[in-house]
Image (cartoon, grey):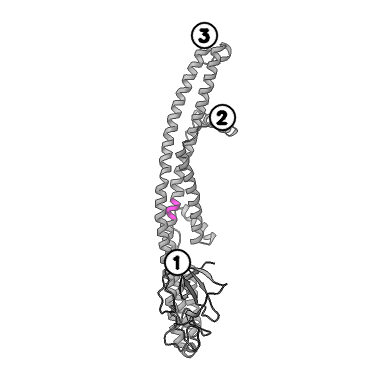
Amino acid sequence: MDFNLKKLTSDAGVFFTRAVQFTEEKLGSAEKTELDAHLENLIARADCTKNWTEKIFRQTEVLLQPNPSARIEEFFYEKLDKKIPSRTTNGELLGQYMLDAAKDFGPGTPYGSTLITVGEYQSRLGGAEREFLQTSAINFLTPLRNFLEGDWRTISKERRLLENRRLDLDICKARVKKAKQAEAKAAAEPDFQETRPRNYVLSASASALWSEEVDKAEQELRVAQTEFDRQAEVTRLLLEGISSTHVNHLRCLHEFVEAQATYYAQCHQYMQELQKELSSANSDTYPNSFASNAKPSTSATCPSPVSSATLPGVSPPCLASSSTPGIAQEPSGQLKIQDVQQPSTGHRKAKVLYDYDAHDTSELSLLADELITVYTVPGMDPDWLVGERGNQKGKVPVTYLELLS
């Protein structure tokens, strides 16, 4: 190891001088060079970007991996530059347990065969989750981590260097100021014994000595100013690159949302297929039981919001005797939609989530994002509300609405 005592002593002296300057600035006894407004705004913007990126990164990690022990394990694998071992998702583990249980209960029994069906779909859901986690980690978490551990560290290093250059510049300014004050004092009251520097000859006048000291301090000031300006430009260019970082993170955010949408769409598809298989299997196994219980279904028996021409009374909208699922019967004496009046209390505003086309004159067509007034009447099917938009009135499905107040 090459130990350079002279360099170490010089660095210690520079550090001490900067520390004195920094302390005097904090105490208000020394002047401080302020950065230009544009550079200050860039620094503030960069700090804001770093803080929020760090928070988003940490919370996304929690979202993708809620287990803190697993996150710590993955952290160490990354620091050791080793491949993270594949970890079974909860859905896959649940599916495997169901398949193992079906073997013990007997795959030929109704319970065992159902466990096999559900277990296979749970494994599919777990596989979809695994793919979502991998895609999100690559397309979203990795770019954020690269910014925090790469670009931001470079920016922080250059900012620290800029702060040191600023302290050096202010130190040189203070030296020039003190040298000029001493020169003026020596010119007024020359004193060879107290004002001469150690390395100057005794015959030199104090004024001439301080004049040379002023020239030396001004030369150091010009050098310090040049280094400060150069470092300020380097830092400014790096900080302006934050705009490119925002563009990159925006693209990654779109990819993250796309991965989420794909994952949830797969889950929805798997669950719909599972419901159909279970419904078909149950109908084959217990045909009489399911025929007698076909009435109260709201989502499985009535998958689409189709209504009758009048408001239902006390009967549910889906009856076993209906020719079409979801079509309500119209018993004699039933209230017409045109006869319904808005109550003085109990009505609410609702936001329409999706477009909906009325199937008959008793329903009200809807457009996504519009606001309507909704209310219910005694004995009405809970899956429907009466909606009003201006002079138009009709039944609307609750699943298409977001109640606001």
Q: Are marks 3 and 1 in contact (CB under 8 Å)?
A: no
Q: Which residue is mark 1?
A: 370
Residue at the far bottom: name it: 288
Q: Earlier in the sequence, mark 3 or mark 1?
A: 3
User: Measured from the top left, where is residue 304 in percent x and y?
Assistant: 43, 78
Q: How crowded is the residue under tag 2: few (<14 C-alpha within 10 Å), some, or many (20+)?
A: some
Residue under the point 51% across and 16% down: 210
| Image coordinates for residue 368, horizontal then vertical, percent | 42, 67
Question: In terms of depth relative to the viewer, which is nearer, 184 or 376?
Answer: 376
Which of 232 and 318 lies nearest the eye of the viewer?
318
- The picture places residue 216, in percent across and down from the top left corner, at 47, 21
With respect to residue 324, does 210 lie above or below?
above
**Disc number lying in front (3 or 2):** 2
Give the SS element for disc 3: loop
| Three-letter residue code for mark 1 | Glu
Residue 97: image location, x then y, percent: 50, 74
Which element is circle 2 on?
Answer: loop
Q: Are marks 1 and 2 in contact (CB under 8 Å)?
A: no
Q: Which quadrant is home to the C terminus?
A: bottom right
The amino acid type found where label 3 is placed reads Ser
* Amino acid type of the residue that numbered disc 2 sits on in the rendered structure: Ala
Badge 1 density bin: few <14, some 14–19, many ≥20, Cα 10 Å: some
Q: Label 2, on which residue?
A: 30
**Residue found farthest to the top:** 203
Q: Quadrant of residue 379?
A: bottom right
Residue behind mark 3: 203
Q: CA distance from mark 3 to mark 2?
A: 35 Å
Q: Are marks 3 and 2 in contact (CB under 8 Å)?
A: no
| Residue 175, label in figure | none
Q: Is residue 302 visible?
A: yes
**Span highlighted in magenta in the image:** 141-146
